[in-house]
Image: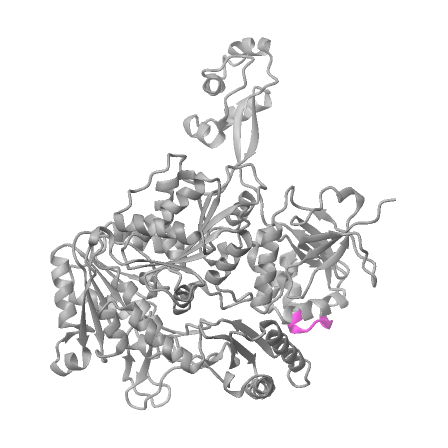
Amino acid sequence: MEPDTYAEVLLPLPVSGTFTYHIPASLLLKVTPGVRVIVPFGEKKSYTGLVRRLTTEPPGTFLPKEISRVLDARPLLDEKHFLFWEWMADYYLCTPGEVMDAALPAGLKPAHHFSYTIDPGFKTLGILSEKEREIFFYVQTHPGVLDDELGKLYGKRKAPALIKTLLKKEALSEHSQMIDTYKPRTLRYIRISPRLTEDEIRQLPKKLKRAQRQWELFAACARDWSPGEPSHEFLKQELLRQYPFPGALSSLKKKGILEEYELPVSRLERGEEKQINLKKLTTAQQQVLEQIHHLFQEKNTVLLHGVTSSGKTEIYFHLIHEQIQQGKQVLYLLPEIAITGQMIHRLREAFGDLAGIYHSRYSDSERIETWLNLSGNDNDKPLQVVLGVRAAVFLPFRDPGLIIVDEEHETSYKQDSTAPRYHARDAAVMLGHLTGARVLLGSATPSIESYFNARTGKYGLTELKERYTRLAMPEIQVVDMKKVYKRREIRGHLSYALYDAIRETLDERQQVILFQNRRGFSPYIQCADCGWIPYCKNCDVSLTYHKNSNRLICHYCGYNIPVPEKCPVCGSTHLHTRGFGTEKIEEEIRLIFPDSHPARLDLDTAHTKRQYLSIIRDFEEKNTDILIGTQMITKGLDFGHVRVVGILNADNLLHFPDFRAWERSYQLMAQVSGRAGRKDKQGHVIIQTYDPDHPVITDVLNHDYFHMYSSQLKERKLFHYPPFFRLIRITLKHRKNDTVSQAASRLATMLKKKFKDKNVLGPQYAFIPRIRNQYIKQILLKLERDTDKAAAKNILQEFEKYLRETPGFKGLQFINDVDPM
């Protein structure tokens, strides 16, 4: 007798390890590692899990439940990707279930839900509380409503308790169901019925003599067709567009002359099949390409440090072509969804239908179909190049040959809002190590950590120091705003130097980019008489003034109020705006240059992919001539007619309280400067600052990345920061200030006993001490490079478990951010 077989199943839950399930005989041939299965969990629920491995060893302490259903014909994930997930969970201090939850699109995890109806026998409304009555009447008017919807309406914490009480009082009935939100896309087709005999076909002219429209429709379908041959297929929608006779079509179907059927079609946007077309490389680009080939023979990861507009993308394309010729796949990572639009167009121009795209602005169904395509679970032509943002690092490539991480310095590659709090660049390096794919990091301003790894031999390093076609680097002019204000040489927030440069550029019918790293009209408003400033009621932060909506808005929780007509403290009507954001600059530009066509690119104007692409397209096509924006305009966009770039306030970048402030300031200013002068004429960059002699300004002025790197490296070594030390930022949150303060102090004391005092900083309040009515304290733990990371993480998790179980600390949240940005 064959021994029973069991599956260790990974579930998308924040719990450690896997769960063991028995495989019934009917599913034995279908259950293999990597396929999705539906399994029962707890008394009532079911979940979608992934089979991690099979075993004949029964669990010793309990009788395992059975797998209910298998969802995949082929494994969705292979062993290498499971190992990648497990590395990520271990390194970033989370569980493999949390990695699974982040990696898979929602539709690949059919979820268990409860729906509710009114119990027909319930008559005693008087025993229900006011809140219970609200839910009762809502369910009465919405029978079959799901638990998720009730949670959104009545609170995720309060609704379950209220529902439980209503069930006890027999006011509601509960129904359990699995909901699969993904449905394959289908199109409806029309063809001549294959069951139609030759004799019936001969009778058709007579049979349809008085039905002219039916005959016309049949004749259209029978054109270039002979009896006995397979019928042509016609898309129903197109057929009715040419012959708008739905009644005639219905009659022909009833008579068995035509038949209608469905065929599944892919949702994936793909270019046309075409011959691969690449530009010829310059001598400098060809030399770098050959260096990369040589370095890849010795190193798995190579850093390409190329100045802005040096043509790094063309080198990437030649490397992609080589991988395609070898039958390999390529993952091409970009830091922002915003810049994927330009790049996918270029990729499809070069590689046609071999290139696809993956990010969160696409529908869940489109992302699911990308997963199914790459894992071999559909019949479509496999993608060989996928362009994506950080979440694309989870895609199940079967045979990856190359991973490109463009603009590798960008902080957008770091996921910091939910677990796993991973850095996609570092994850890509590990993915390459596990799968054998080579990893190419590219940037004009590499992160200090990556450049250090390249200089010390961990990565290969190649440098491209000249711009494409030897175009000169932009001329950079620094304007001292102290002198400007003293001499009153300013219009709005534009120095005369910047104003004159914009005027000259507009006269030449060229374009301008203005960079201000703050959205909104102004950071806050203030009463001129008593100094009152409006603050968010949920967060310890002032409300930002947005003139278009005439509201004060919190950028952290969304709380907003109308702008008051008078000060609520002293009654004064003298309420003035302070500081300036992109919205205010846009208004000033319209007043100062009334003939210009400005546009604004920030989170307020580009909520959606369509809005963003519309703004970019208008600028590319010169429908707008001045683009005002935040960091969104610094990230790899390529415009051919930009002559002037203005950085309106360099100081708010330089003086941010963070050890990476100077590095980021250099990167932002160098990157935005790189948007100037990309075709045939040298660009002009104007930096407005109150500190023109600042070392970072000097480095930007001299295009001297290496000096910035060297000076920052010395400071980081002295003060124990990356790349010499690893950081873990521990964040504690609670609704009560006293609770979070006591817990943070106790945790810091315990950590200082285990680690060196100087390597535990804090506790201290976060930069914003309260967000969404949660008080926040942070501790920064520094670990030497040779520290046993596993032991350190075990100590940290042990301490946090102890505090969670301590009376008085109920509801305390811990967030561990490894390598915080």
Is 668 situated left or right of 124 in this image?
left
Q: Is residue 129 magenta?
A: yes
Depth order, front residue of 64/733:
64
- The reply to whether residue 149 is visible in this rendering is no
Q: Is residue 806 magenta?
A: no
Residue 233 x/y as whole percent: 50, 25
Q: Residue at x 59, y 8 (%)?
A: 199
Is 405 situated left or right of 515 in this image?
right
Outermost residue to the right? 1
Residue stretch in magenta:
126-132
The quadrant where residue 739 appears: bottom right
In the rendered image, the vertical position of residue 672 relative to residue 398, given as above or below: below
Q: Quadrant of the C terminus?
A: bottom left
Q: Residue at x 44, y 51 (%)?
A: 297
Main SS of the magenta part reads helix
Q: Residue at x 58, y 84 (%)?
A: 751
Residue 394 x/y as whole percent: 53, 55
Is 367 situated left or right of 59 in this image?
left
In the rendered image, the vertical position of residue 99 relative to residue 246, given as above or below: below
Residue 47 x/y as whole percent: 68, 56
Depth order, front residue of 126/719:
719
Residue 291 x/y as whole percent: 36, 52
Depth order, front residue of 511/782:
782
In the rendered image, the vertical position of residue 132 relative to residue 511, given as above or below: below
Q: Residue at x 34, y 71 (%)?
A: 709
